[in-house]
Amino acid sequence: MSIQSLPEGKLNHLQKKIVFTLAFLALYRVGVHIPIPGVDTIALGNFFRDQGGNLLGMFNMFTGGALSNFSIFALGVMPYISASIISQLLTVVVPHLEMLSKEGEAGRRKITQYTRYGTVLLAIIQGYMISSALETQVFSGRNLVVDPGIAWKSLSVLTLASGTAFVMWLGEQITEKGVGNGISLIIFCGIVAGLPQVIGSTYSEYTNQQIDLFKIIMLSGVCTLIIAGVVFVEQGSRLIPVQYAKRQVGRKVFGGQASNLPLKVNTAGVIPPIFAGSLLQFPVTAAALSPTSSFAEWINLVFIPGQWLYNAVYVSLIVFFAFFYTSIVYKADDIAENLKRHGGYIPGIRPGARTAEYIHNVLSRLTLVGGVYLAAICVLPTILTGRFNVQFYFGGTSLLIVVGVALETFRQIDAHRQSLRYDSFLKKGSIRPRGR
């Protein structure tokens, strides 16, 4: 049954969800190009083009150029991601938050509300830091801020915090009423929006003989291999066999069938690179407060993509968040308890604590492989491009996020289409619920 054969009302429902998602993403892209008053946008754009190869340029890429425009959405979703990291960390160590996380939907809504408050607070702090840094910046003899002062700083901080809150609302609306994860799609949209500029600059360097054809082919090959590797690993999973015992209720016998418990190789998805990238923003922001200090000079000299310190910290954070996020999403004790409650067991493993231990060991091995895979995908392109001396920061992290978010979004669209097909089959076919 094709999607064209679905009922018109059901088909329109899916189309409306897709159109809603695209409309809200377009609204976000419009806000990226609305600058905050009082900034020399030409000098600021030239300044960020000069910073393209370091960490500051990479975060500008994640926001789709919003930071280089110093637009109302300049902070993007980074404060929300940082607040989510803090919220999940506190859920493990604070008893009240841990209790809320176990209260079901009501508790999760309360934690989400705390995360929103934390997002606004972090946006105010980061907005103040960025505004203070821009007031003292001079590029090519031009001040980046035309009329610095307390009035402009207050306006910029208020605008940046409000813009972040609005972007957070956009993401939540997309998740609730659209297709896919809203926050991930906003990051996806920002990265893809910079792709034409990267391709154009690469072609311009080729025409000006600043880069030869071999390097372009090499970079294209690396990107192709990364895409193929991401698709291959994201589709991979470990299937744990599960057998359900037979049980008799009245005259009917239930259970007795065999099933599988799928555990993905990369259970954390694109969350670890996003979380790690968000935390790496803090040293750059702190250095921007005092650009002439020795700390700022050391950060700008050493703590950039491709350098050993950056790569070491980045890899460590990715592996850590892979284990951390997996431990939150997949709780072996809860899985073992659910299997035991429904009469399921893993052949050769005793139900209960032994099953939880077995699942935990399998998850740990898979998470280690997934964390190493994520770190390799994110770091290897920066090493290769640095070796070939090519400024091409649209590398592993961005490609991982783009491919991962695209796969997850299409997976949700396909699941929605399948549900519509089953619903149409039940309504048009001979199968009817009991009592009709």
Image (cartoon, rainbow, N blue to C red):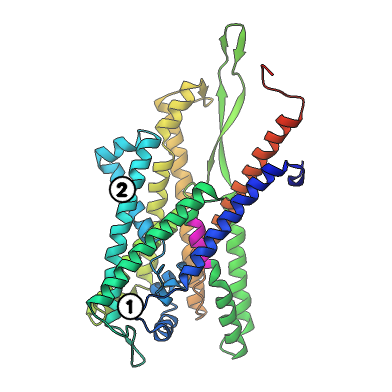
Quadrant containing the N terminus in the rendered view: top right
Residue 284: give x, y in percent of width and height: 32, 71
Identify the mark nearer the N-term, 1 or 2. 2
Decide which of 227, 66 is in the foreground and name it.
66
**Residue at the bottom extreme, as displayed:** 141
Q: Magenta stretch: give its range.
A: 184-191
Is 189 included in the stretch rendered in magenta?
Answer: yes
Q: Is residue 81 visible?
A: yes
Count of numbered circles on the image: 2
Residue 31: give x, y in percent of width and height: 46, 68
Query: What residue would you read off at disc 1?
Result: 300
Q: Amino acid at mark 2?
A: Tyr
Q: In this image, 296 relative to 386: left or right? A: left
Q: State the SS at label 2.
A: helix
Decide which of 428, 118 is in the foreground and name it.
428
Residue 391: give x, y in percent of width and height: 50, 79
Q: Is residue 398 visible?
A: no
User: What residue lies at 34% left-to-right and 72% top-to-bottom?
Assistant: 303
Is 281 included in the stretch rendered in magenta?
Answer: no
Q: In this image, 250 relative to 51: left or right? A: right
Cα–Cα span, label 1 and label 2:
34 Å
Disc nearest the viewer among 1 and 2: 2
Query: What residue would you read off at disc 2?
Result: 114
Q: State the SS at label 1.
A: helix
User: What residue lies at 50% left-to-right and 22% top-to-bottom?
Assistant: 342
Above or below: residue 284 compared with residue 353: below
User: What residue lies at 43% left-to-right and 26% top-to-bottom?
Assistant: 337
Above or below: residue 337 compared with residue 138: above
Instruction: Determine the main secondary structure of the stretch shown in magenta.
Output: helix
User: What residue lies at 42% left-to-right and 50% top-to-bottom?
Assistant: 322
Q: Amino acid at mark 1?
A: Asn
